[in-house]
Image (cartoon, rainbow, N blue to C red):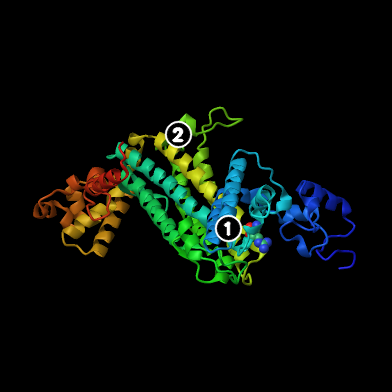
Amino acid sequence: MAGKTRSGTPAKNAASKKAAAAARGSGAGKEATAGNRSWGGRFDATPDRKTQAFTASIGFDQRLYRYDIRGSIAHASMLAAVGILTAAEKKTITAGLREIETEIAGGKFVFDIADEDIHMAIERRLIAKTGAAGAKLHTARSRNDQVVTDVRLYVKDALAWIDAAIGDLQCALLEVSLRHQDAILPGYTHMQRAQPVLLAHHLLAYYEMLARDRERLGDARGRVDILPLGAGALAGTTLPIDRARVAEELGFARVADNSIDAVADRDFILEPLADIAILFAHVSRLAGEIVLWATAEYGFVRLHDAYSTGSSMMPQKKNPDIAELARGKSGRVVGNLVSLLVTTKGLPLAYNSDLQEDKEPLFDSVDTAISSLTVLGAMVRSLTFDEAAMRRAASDSFLLATDLAEILVARGVPFRQAHEVVGKIVRHCLAAGVELTSLGSTSLGAFSPALGPDGDRKAGVAVASLLTVEQAVARRTSAGGTSASQVKKRLRTLARKHGVTA
Ligand code: ARG
């Protein structure tokens, strides 16, 4: 450590020392210590400016100010209730904190990296305003329990914001489905046309995914809703605090049972990040399909001008940027989850500064989710669906091959045998260059008597009348299937639930 002070600051760096002192403003020089005002007692020198810039989180954690102030007011009330503060001190502190809140909200608060983070910035200002009373606020509290209290309050709000944004996208899907209740398009497997389905059925598939996303985020809430404050730095406090009171005032369901766990773990952030990553696995699929559907090759939807952009070079272009970006942003939210998983993995208990890296991924995923969902919902509402183009794509007669096999099953043929028979019919049609629906009952009867005139007579219905796109959809009445009876029932229920109309 030769040439360095105890704090590890290069001793020769007097200039930056001075700069840091200047940056801290008028109060700095008046104090007995050369270090940071909050923890400088054992330090000879202030951290140099680059170190401050590197260690500070104030640039991104200032958005927590309202939660920090709420937490501090609840803490002060509790300290007064247990006799650590006088009623007058509590009043002074509360009023000071309210003023600071107004200053920050009004853009009048000067943020300084010398304060490191929002907690110290607010406390510094409070002490400047209230002196001795403010200096008592941090009693029985550490930034370690303070920061997770703030972030938990934020996450509880964020979960509600994301829930509302997902709900909005769900409503957009319901509106479009209601508008196109009878539209049919090919359903795909392996990107190959598979069977005709209702557009509403296809869109409601996304509704269901999003419903589970909301459920998942809702489930996480209970594990977020726990008060860490009172854990202190890691071991609790010798002072007679009342954590239950603070929990109640801040609206937490309960108090963390273990002070070390309370300050050390970040699973209450990881879980929402994982849920948001899964949400984007869904959102990106919906967005990706819209990109495909808007191509000339599909032509199922036309983008509204307000929700698409042009090319700087190709005058004819109209690009589905919103959908592409909503799809692309899945990369960053998955990255945010992985980032925090890697940061927390293998960390020794309890608090480590590594944990300061928890906030940017969290804020980014929350912001990304809200903006993507909101814009995507508006874009979905503005889409023009080309029902005729979808219907044309669905009228490929080979999409009815499974129906033909099921007709055989209904006429007593074991499914494997029916599959084989229809496979042969398909091969025959492909070789002859004819549609599956073009074969009359005599030709079909040559492949299996059950499909011939005899089979029709016994069944009381002609194969030809069953082998249409409309029938293929209408007859899939199994629970959860694509029949209009099933889909419209579900659509009505959901529209009522969300108060949505076409
Ligand atoms: N800014 C810090 C964070 O975000 C607050 C807690 C810091 N605690 C400490 N002992 N340095 O995690």
| Cβ at disc 2 under 8 Å from ligand 1 | no
Q: Give, as a three-letter code, the residue at label 1.
A: Thr
Q: Give, as a three-letter code, the residue at label 2.
A: Leu
- Quarter of the picture containing the C terminus is top left
Q: Which residue is found at the position 46% from the left and 38% from the top?
A: 295
Dot 2 alpha-carbon crowd within 10 angstroms: few under 14, some 14 to 19, many 20 or more: many
- Quarter of the picture containing the N terminus is bottom right
Sequence order check, earlier mark of 1 and 2 = 1
x, y (%) of residue 175?
Answer: 34, 39
Q: Which residue is mark 2?
A: 303
Residue 86 is marked as 1
**Residue 475 relative to residue 47: left or right:** left
Rendered position, 405 above or below 309: below
Rendered position, 395 above or below 453: above
Q: Which residue is found at the position 46% from the left and 41% from the top?
A: 374
Count the labels in the image: 2
